[in-house]
Amino acid sequence: MQQYFSLAGRTALVTGGSRGIGRMIAQGYLEAGAKVIICCRKLAEGQQTAQELSQYGECIAIGADLSSEAGAKQLAADVAKHTDHLDILVNNAGTSWGAPLEDFPVSGWEKVMQLNVVSVFSCIQQLLPMLRKNASAENPARVINIGSVAGISSFGEEAYSYGPSKAAVHQLSRNLARELVSQHINVNVIAPGRFPSKMTQHIHQDAAAMAEDCQHIPMKRWGREEEMSALAIMLASAGGAYMTGNVIPIDGGFTL
């Protein structure tokens, strides 16, 4: 069944691809045969990751600061130096902010909404010409936005802007899926539960905190790297060619 999940000959861009979920997806795409470009704010960190991932296939790192529209435009210009088209765009770069309700600052909304929502829109907008180039009814281009179960459930953990930002990503993705389907561009969302990342390291590096956290998950464990990779491959391959506008939780049953 390898033919259904092969990404041979495909080119992908993964934002925030130097670590965490972005790195999991980038490695999966490389192993499935794709050429992968990763971008992150710290170029040296991205280059280190690209070097490590190059054992699986062609991986290129570029620097990108997506905290502004200008950053998204620059990203598109830099990607164009390495390829004239994109088959797959994974909008994974994101951030969070935690503080007690009475102390939560407006800046905690502005930063999170910019990176988690506005930059997703800007990246899609700026990269549309490259996504359209090779897209066809038989093999649509894919946009995969990384949402979160925090945008579905109300388990907020004092990160007041994070859940609403991810709910906005889910709705933005539905709107764009409807609009772009006629251009042979599929838009779907992966909504992760708990996976190891910088954002969750304060939990997964503490055995007691990890055990307590797992009590909220019906499967009583966090997600594994290969499980995230496999879902992302499915959405980007023939297996996901007839899917658009979906928000897919991968959470061990947390949203139940």
Image (cartoon, helix red, strand yellow):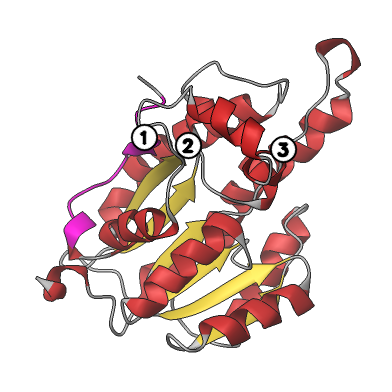
Name the element at disc 2: loop
Q: Which residue is mark 2?
A: 193
Query: Is residue 161 something that shows in the picture?
Result: yes
Sequence-first tag of 3 and 1? 3
For the residue marked with disc 3, what is the amino acid? Ser
In the rendered structure, the answer to whether residue 165 lies left or right of residue 161 reads left
- Residue 168 locus on image (x, y percent): 55, 30
In the rendered structure, the answer to whether residue 32 lies left or right of residue 90 reads left
Question: What is the distance, in whole Å, between disc 2 and disc 3 at their CAs?
Answer: 15 Å
- What crowding class fits label 2: few (fewer than 14 Cα within 10 Å), some (14-19), or many (20 or more)? some
Q: Which residue is mark 3?
A: 96
Using the image, determine if residue 31 lies above or below residue 189: below
Using the image, determine if residue 5 lies above or below residue 240: below
As for residue 246 lying within the magenta part, the answer is yes
For the residue marked with disc 1, what is the amino acid? Gly
- The numbered disc on residue 252 is 1
> Can you tell which quarter of the image residue 29 is in?
bottom left
| Residue nearer the viewer, 129 or 252 | 252
Which residue is situated farthest in the front direction here?
208
Question: What is the distance, in whole Å, between disc 1 and disc 2 at their CAs?
Answer: 7 Å
Q: How many marks?
A: 3
- What crowding class fits label 1: few (fewer than 14 Cα within 10 Å), some (14-19), or many (20 or more)? some
Q: Nearer the viewer, mark 3 or mark 1?
A: 1
Tell whether label 2 touches label 1 (CB within 8 Å).
yes
Name the element at disc 1: loop
Which secondary structure class fits the magenta region best?
Answer: loop
As for residue 185 lying within the magenta part, the answer is no
Magenta region:
239-254
- The numbered disc on residue 126 is none
